[in-house]
Image (spheres, rainbow, N blue to C red):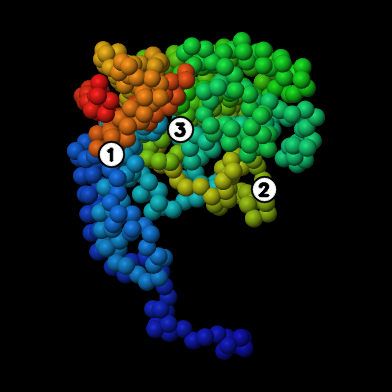
Amino acid sequence: MDSRASELPCRDDAAHDRTETLDPRDWASVAALAYRIVDDCVGYLEHVRDRPVWQPMPEHVEALFRTPLPHGPTAIEEVYGLVRDNVLPYPMGNVHPRFWSWYMGAGNFTGALADFLAAVQGSNLGGGSHAAALVDQQVVGWLRDMVGFPASASGTLVSGGSMANLVGLTVARNSMAGADLREDGLAVLDRPLRFYASDQVHSCHRKAVETLGLGNKALRRIRTDAAYRLDVRAVRDAVAEDRERGFKPACLIGTAGTVNSGAVDDLAALADLAEEQGLWFHVDGCIGALLAIAPQNAWRVRGIERADSVALDPHKWLHAPFEIGCALVKDRAKHRQSFAVSPEYLQGTSRGIASGEWLHEFGLQTSRGFGALKVWMALKEHGVAKFGRLIDQNVAQATILAHLVRAHPLLELLAEPEINIVCFRFAGAGHNEDDIKRINIEIMLRLQEAGLAAVSDTTLGGHHCLRAAICNHRTRVEDLEQFVGDVVRIGREFSGA
């Protein structure tokens, strides 16, 4: 007999019972609570139109989130009560039909159920042989097909557009450097790299080039035309100028839907230019790439299929609950070469869990949640054609809103909407630019505080304005009519017009 056996502690039932877990002692009561939560959530969305878009939190609610770290337990029913009473009533508001601030989707209930199921299953999407990994790659494949990329293209799901653009620009930098930047770093470059984008490009691109060690000056913002589209001739001139100055032009960034006005660059012309100049062609399609699935508007992004990489956001026009983005790269080998690391603890096997592909080799995250399921389930439920029709519906609604603005003498349309973003302002006679800005900011804040509608503001062509981004499957024409009426009423009250 092994003498070590006598040294082991004696196992008894009492000791065994003291083993702790996070699982409930009473699964039946937890199931009952779960059913109640689902019922409450169904009611929350069913009656979303009856609630304020947004509302300020009272002091007692804010105070709850300043309480110290809990050291002891609280019954889960009580914890849910705190969420029900203090979190759910005070959302950002993007699920509401009159939320048009910034650029967000409105979510969908199937996606919410999918997030719950994904959390229960608990899979890590770093890779491996399991069903969640296959769902993940199928969703990437579907998104690839939507924008017209070949079956050989690769992709990775990420948190959102900023990360998707960072992935695409990382591959662009590494592929165009002419040196092994992963091994030797930027110091090995014989010439500084230059990237080109419009002066309307999203700020995440600045963060990306800074994160990539290139510096903000490496991103040249090129002038746009009267419709806020990138001036192709100006890009060509900038590339020639940089070559003469000893820089290395590397990447051309086209925008399929600018964040300010929704302008779509001429992607086909940019693809021609990138090919002519030997540049990597990246498309920031986080706003408008999925126009490609909209029957009436797909023509607007013609040429996106010629890009070397594309960033897009399923949590926008596919209305997946936050958060999920996607980076697509046409050259799978270049994509993998930019991120793959194979440490001894992540070796593949011919059988078992590690026999599947390591998905972390195509991005920055080794640990990643099962976000693909909410896209997969919603596409299975509704079909891609319905999402395409909803995109067309939002574009048509922007045209209607622009018409309502034009029809009112106190409102001014700042730009003809190209897709679904409408920039306009209250501009009564006798007001200078400073007055107009002050009035419109007040209109925006009063709309929010009254829970009537949520829009953001921006500056377009040197003029401050309100900005309504209609990326919402719950919006109706009556919401737009009510919104315009409220803008005019508040503007008159505040300005005395």
In the image, residue 156 above or below residue 256: below
Residue 224, picture quadrant: top right
Instruction: Tell me the element at label 2.
Output: loop
Question: Would you say the residues marked 3 and 2 are in contact, meaning their CB atoms lie under 8 Å apart?
Answer: no
Residue annotated with mark 1 = 449
Q: CA distance from mark 1 to mark 2?
A: 52 Å
- How crowded pointer 2 is (Cα within 10 Å; few <14, some 14-19, many 20+) is rated as few
Q: Give left or right: position of 376 versus 28.
A: right
* Label total for image: 3
Please identify, in this view, whether the residue under mark 1 or under mark 2 is nearer the observer: 1
Nearer-N-terminus badge (1/3): 3
Residue annotated with mark 2 = 342
Residue annotated with mark 3 = 313
Residue in front for this viewpoint, 117 or 417: 417
- How crowded pointer 3 is (Cα within 10 Å; few <14, some 14-19, many 20+) is rated as many
Instruction: Tell me the element at label 3.
Output: loop
